[in-house]
Amino acid sequence: MSPRPSGIVVLLTDFGTRDPYVGLMKGMVLKNQPSATLVDLTHDVPPQDVAVGAFLLRSAIDRFPTGSIVLAVVDPGVFTTRRILCGVRHGMYWIAPDNGLLGEVWALPGTGELRQVDLIHLGFCFTSRTFHGRDVLAPLAGNLAAGRVGFTSVGPRVEDPVVLPLLDSGSPRVVFVDAYGNLVTNVPASAIARVRSVQIAGRSMPIRGTYGEVAKGSLLALINSYDLLEIAEYQGSAANTLGLGCGAEVTLET
């Protein structure tokens, strides 16, 4: 059973904030539901990096009220044959292009349903061939939040969404670098019960519980808010100090 929309719309994009794109999307949500509460998850997904967008999307699970609508746009294939999806899972609604962006959310345990948005049936018109976020996804989020469009009426069920390799699968490696220069790996907390230290780029560092357990400028490894192993520098940037980024290999030392 689909939850009642809460009126909260959470946005994730790769638009950044220099251009008016985010503001225009918010305007179209509000045009269709003026009382909506808009929350920015992030607009700094690396440009067109669907895999990182998918990874960051899963951080929203269980962090917003039931019935919240997550609107995600990282869409290098805009106006191609790729579909637009609307799904319900983890007590929330998810709207995104069918390019793997919802893959991490759907990979986690839970039940749910995906539907392809029937643009013609819903009466959406395109004023641009490059901005479905404004013309389609944002109006859909607003109408869904307002209860004007029901989930089961958006279109037919989808059983074959595009799937990308999960970022937290495969060998231990860095999958994301945050604004602090912390190197977030794909190693879950459950995998380090017997690990005493971590090696990266030929340097070994201890596993600690908090950043402040080492001296300023020291490197350490710890479990972060994603419940993943992270390599950090206390009051510094591990990425800059080590000269590393996404894809860097990590060795777990027992």
Image: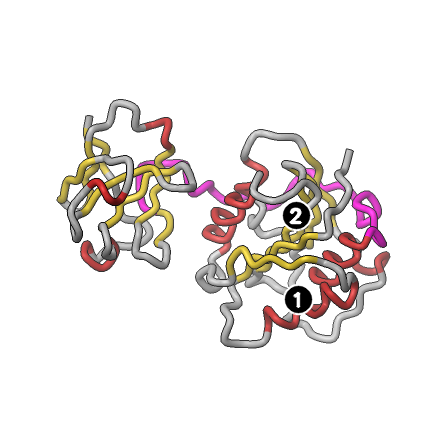
Residue 167, placed above or below residue 77: above
Which quadrant holds residue 130?
A: bottom right
Taking 7 as reference, is 192 left or right?
left
Residue neighbourhood size for the residue with mark 2, other residues' Cα within 10 Å, grouped as few (<14), some (14–19), many (≥20): many
Q: Nearer the viewer, mark 1 or mark 2?
A: 1
Q: Is-magenta flag for residue 23?
A: no
Dot 1 or dot 2, earlier in sequence: 1
Q: Quadrant of the C terminus?
A: top left
Numbered mark located on residue 202 in the image: none
- Report the Cα–Cα distance between label 1 and label 2: 16 Å
Taking 183 as reference, is 40 left or right?
right
User: In the image, residue 228 lies at what x, y percent?
Assistant: 37, 38
Numbered mark located on residue 94 in the image: 2
Which quadrant holds residue 115?
A: top right
User: In the image, residue 249 lies at what x, y percent?
Assistant: 26, 43
Q: Amino acid at mark 2?
A: Trp
Query: Residue at 33% across / 52% down in the picture?
Result: 246
Query: Residue at 70% across / 62% down in the picture?
Result: 138
Secondary structure, mark 1, is helix
User: In the image, residue 142 lies at what x, y percent?
Assistant: 75, 59
Residue linked to disc 1: 26
Query: Residue at 48% across / 47% down in the picture?
Result: 55
* Residue range of the region highlighted in magenta in the rendering: 147-174
Q: Amino acid at mark 1?
A: Lys
